[in-house]
Amino acid sequence: MKRLVGYFLNGLIFTAPAALTIYVLWWIFTTVDGWLRIPMPGVGFVVTLGLITLIGFLATNFLARRLLQWMDEFLERLPGVRLLYTAIKDVTDAFVGEKRRFGQPVIVTINPAAGAEAIGFLTQDSLAELGMADHVAVYLPFSYSIMGQMLVFPRDRVRHLSAPSAKVMAFVVSGGVSEVGTGKE
C-alpha cells in the first residue's frame, strides 16, 4: 500500500504543474477569444499577440510614437482613470522596457545580530527627495505570490548581487527552490 501511495504522490508531483499550466493557458486563450467573439479557439489570442506586436512596431516609428505619447498623456490626465493607468504602467515598466526597475538584485541585512538577510531589488538608489539621502528603496517580493513589500534601508545595509535579476526573482518567488546560477541576462 505504501508503494501505491508513493506512486500516486510521484504522479501528482509530475502531473500537477503540467495540468495547472495547461489549464491557465486554456483559460487565457478562451478568455481572449471570448472578448473578440471569434469562434475558432486560439485565433483571438493570436490576433491579440499580433496587435500588441504591431503597436510595439509602431511605437518605434516617430509619428506613431508621438500619437502613442499623446494617448499616454491623455490617459494620465483623466480623473479616476489616471490612478489606475499610471499604477498599471508603473508595474509593467518595472518588469520590462527601458525603465525596468527590477534589474538590480540586492541582499539586505535585516537583523545584523541574528545574521538575518533578505533578497530583493533596488528600486530607488537615493531617497534624497524624502530627506533620506543615505537610504535606498528595496522591493522584497513574497514567495509564491506576485505581491511584495517595499522597504527603506540605510545604504550600508544593502549589497548588490551578481546573479541575473530574472533568476533572482524566480529564486525568491519559488521560496528558494529554483536554481539561481551566475550567468548574464
Image (spheres, grey):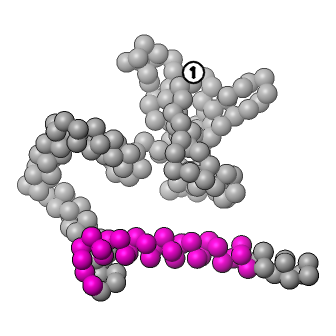
182 w.r.t. 9: above or below: above
Towards the viewer: 27 or 119 = 27
Q: Residue at x 57, y 21 (%)?
A: 154
Disc 1 residue type?
A: Pro
Crowd tier of the residue under label 1, counting other residues whose Cα lies within 10 Å: few below 14, some 14–19, many 20 or above: some
Where residue 76 sits: x, y (%)? 20, 39
Where residue 157 sits: x, y (%)? 63, 25
Q: Residue at x 60, y 53 (%)?
A: 144
Residue 28 forms part of the magenta stretch:
yes
Q: Is residue 131 left or right of residue 78?
A: right
Q: Is residue 47 in view from this perspective?
A: no
Towards the viewer: 166 or 39 = 39
13 w.r.t. 180: above or below: below
Placement of the N terminus among the 4 image quadrants:
bottom right
Q: How many marks?
A: 1
Residue sitting at the far top: 131
Q: Residue at x 10, y 52 (%)?
A: 67
Which is the main secondary structure of the residues drawn in magenta? helix
Towards the viewer: 7 or 119 = 7
> In terms of secondary structure, where does tag 1 sit?
strand
Q: Is residue 103 left or right of residue 80?
A: right
Towards the viewer: 121 or 38 = 38
Where residue 119 sits: x, y (%)? 62, 40
Residue 78 forms part of the magenta stretch:
no
97 w.r.t. 32: above or below: above
Q: Is residue 112 left or right of residue 172?
A: right
Q: Residue at x 34, y 84 (%)?
A: 41
Mark 1 — residue?
A: 154
Which segment is the magenta one?
A: 11-39
